[in-house]
Image (spheres, grey):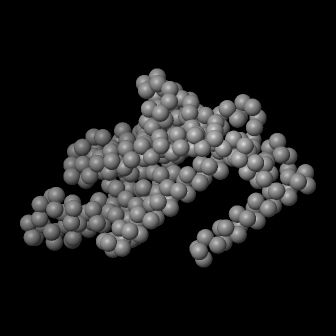
Amino acid sequence: MKKVLPALVFFCLLVLGLELAVKWDLLAESLIPAPSTVVKTLVELQADFLAAFFETLKNVVIGLLMSIVFGGGLALIFSLSDLLKRAILPFAIFFQTVPIIAIAPLLVIYFGFGAPTVIASSFIVSIFPMIANTLMGLESASEAQKDLFKIYHASPLKILFKLKLPIAYSYVYSGLKISAGLSIIGAIAGEFVSGGGLGALIDSARTQQRVDIVFAALLLLSLMGLLFLATLEILNRLILKRRPFAMN
């Protein structure tokens, strides 16, 4: 509680400040709505917001799980084969440099409107941190540690599971936290062009000049991000309690 108390106090002061600034006409409500207006909008349109929230959440979870599986799998392959790493990794870096909003229309052509495009968008944006962080962790074992395993005739797979993976744990966890945030951004970008979820709700509110709906959707997206981080933190504590890997 002590860790989150400063942030909680700052958030309450910020909400109170915004509420008073709008009530005293220091801020135009057409640009920044009062927090009470955002809450009122959330209550009035709760059915729409709940449906959109769970639709986005479902697509983000699928996209993130795909990133974890494929990103982690590719990093394992790269750590075992330097040839494949030099052949494929540059293309992964290239895709990371392309803005997702630029290729989202292509995803609509390939996958159609709706969930498939949103999942693909979320997956493309969030896979690179999993590859990069996992690979960095797997390659962080020192030569002396590897030599020690080789002295005892350990196989490459034994070195991978007994030495490299435990050392890489903290890097993988960092990659998961980055990918979790990026998966939400990717899903929203996909929903802007393919429809559905909170992204479509924001896009619709933009055309109606309803900033209260936009802020309410942003609040739900923030809650989604916090939900992911809290879940990862709980899983991390459970894993460290059972297997106390060193955290860099």
Which residue occupies the extreme top position in the image?
109
Residue displayed at 63% across by 41% down:
47
In this picture, residue 44 sits left or right of residue 134: right
With respect to residue 191, does 50 lie above or below? below
Q: Position of residue 148 (x, y in %)?
A: 16, 72
The residue under the point 67% across, 67% down is 8
Please state which of residues 123 and 234 is positioned toward the viewer in this rendering: 234
Residue lying at the far left in this picture: please name it: 153
Q: Nearer the viewer, residue 71 or 184?
A: 184
Relative to residue 174, is residue 128 depicted above or below? above
Across and down, in percent, residue 80 comes to 21, 52
Q: Residue at x 44, y 65 (%)?
A: 234
Total marks placed: 0
Give the quadrant of residue 10: bottom right
Q: Quadrant of the N terminus?
A: bottom right
Residue 109 at x, y percent in the picture: 46, 22
Q: Is residue 244 visible?
A: yes
In front here: 128 or 213? 213
- Residue shown at the point (67%, 32%) measured from the top left: 204
- Furthest-bottom residue in this view: 2
Quarter of the rendering containing residue 30: top right
Rendered location of residue 226, percent (x, y): 55, 57
Q: Quick one: quadrant of the C terminus?
A: bottom left
Taking the image as shown, residue 137 lies to the left or right of residue 210, namely left
- Residue 154 is drawn in which quadrant? bottom left
